[in-house]
Amino acid sequence: MSQEKVIKQELQSSSESKQSVEGDNNSTAQGNESTIIQGDDNNIDNSQENIHVIVNVVKNESIKKTSDICQKDEEYEIGYVISGKAKRKDKTTLKAIEKHLREILNAASLTIYDIDEGSVKFFFNGTQEDLEKLENAFKSGVLKDIFDIPIEDVKFVEDNKLALTIAGDISYTDIAKLKSSLTGVDKKEILVQKIRSNRDGKVLNIAKADLSGANLSGANLSGANLSGANLSGANLNGANLNGADLNGADLNGAGLSGANLSGAYLSGAYLRRADLRRAYLINPNLSEANLSEANLSFAYLSDADLRRANLSEADLSDANLRRANLSEANLSDANLRRAYLILAQLGGADLSGANLSEADLINANLRRADLILAKLGGADLSGANLSEADLRGASFENSIVINAKFSNNSLGITRELKQELIKKGAIFEDYLEDPLILTPIKK
């Protein structure tokens, strides 16, 4: 079936239609907007879902016209996803490609022996004659695609070994599934080897990879796509995750001590009980991330986006949170002793029971924060905004409150506490309006 026919069918069919192309027949099955390529394997367990190479045709008006399949002003992007759970089915995909090329080229010895990522690259071995048939068929224009997927290049990599590259960009996670079916090596081990061998800093696409418990200490994952990946219990101590996409990743109990997470996208990530001691997290996106009970002592979190993050019971002692946005974050019972919170945004944050003793909160915004039973002894709150904060049970012993702003009607502001804070240089909203209430208490 040509690409043009696929698109025409796509335009005419509902969002529930799909066509399944199998190795030795042309049966169809109903599903979503996909073309599924399968091979022939008489031993396939048909009770399992049949997912192999999926060609998605997606309307995209923003991309430039790159081929003759685009019609009028409407443009299309073709993507390829290789998936499936069973190794047998992944192997069937490879058999289908092998069989197709053997038949059309009359080259019986062609065999896929390896696969690589990027534009999907298949490595073939066979007789020199059969490999040359494949190369010449591509160069002459006779062989332009495999199951309607355009071939980008065919070239020898060494004697009796040839690489065929098809268009499309898929994750190395999916490549590992196919490599596993070829070699029998566990796909997690293949992924770890790929990451470990990444010496030149290549940006890796390993979205949704299962790397739970993997030893990746010191690994170079700069800019890597790890969205949705399972990294629970993984050892990432000292790893370079600068600019990595960890959106929705599971990092429960992961070791990230000393890791570089500068600029990393961790929105919605699960980091409960993760070890982030001395981790470098300048300007990361951690909004709505779960960091409950995580160890972030001495971590560098300057300018971090931690809006609505869950940091309950987390250890943030001595952490650098300068200008960090912790608006509406849950910091209940967190340890923020000696934390550096200059200019931090803590508006509406839950700091109930938190230990902020000796913390540097100069010019921090704590408006409407919940500070019930918070420990603020020895904290520097100079210029901080605590208006409308809930201060019931909060302790200010030896704290510095010069020019700190408080509300007269805040919960927990007793007459005695107000007098004490004013003596230390605090400012109340009613200071100029009603100076009589500032009369010292007679003992």
Image: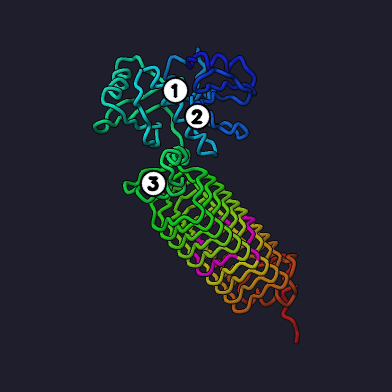
Label 3 with label 2: CB-CB less than 8 Å: no
Q: Amino acid at mark 1?
A: Ile
Report x, y in % for residue 14. 64, 19
Residue occupying the point 49% across, 51% down: 211
Give the main secondary structure, helix, strand or loop, of the magenta stretch: loop
Residue 218 at least partly seen: yes
As for residue 324 lying within the magenta part, the answer is yes
Q: Residue furthest front?
A: 42
Cα distance in 3D space between marks 3 and 2: 22 Å
Position of 418 with respect to 343 (left or right) is right
Q: Nearer the viewer, residue 106 or 375?
A: 106
Report x, y in % for residue 296. 52, 64
Q: Earlier in the sequence, mark 3 or mark 2?
A: 2
Q: Residues within 10 Å of mark 3 (few under 14, many from 20)?
A: some
Q: Earlier in the sequence, mark 1 or mark 3?
A: 1
Q: Amino acid at mark 3?
A: Lys
Cα distance in 3D space between marks 1 and 3: 26 Å
Q: Which residues are magenta?
A: 314-332
- What kind of colouring is applied to the model shown? rainbow
Q: Quadrant of the C terminus?
A: bottom right
As for residue 135 lying within the magenta part, the answer is no
How many marks the image carries: the answer is 3
Q: Amino acid at mark 2?
A: Val
Label 1 with label 3: CB-CB less than 8 Å: no
On residue 257, which mark appears? none
* Residue linked to disc 2: 53
Q: Residue furthest bottom?
A: 443
Q: Nearer the viewer, residue 370 or 76?
A: 76
* Residue linked to disc 3: 194
Report x, y in % for residue 394. 68, 72
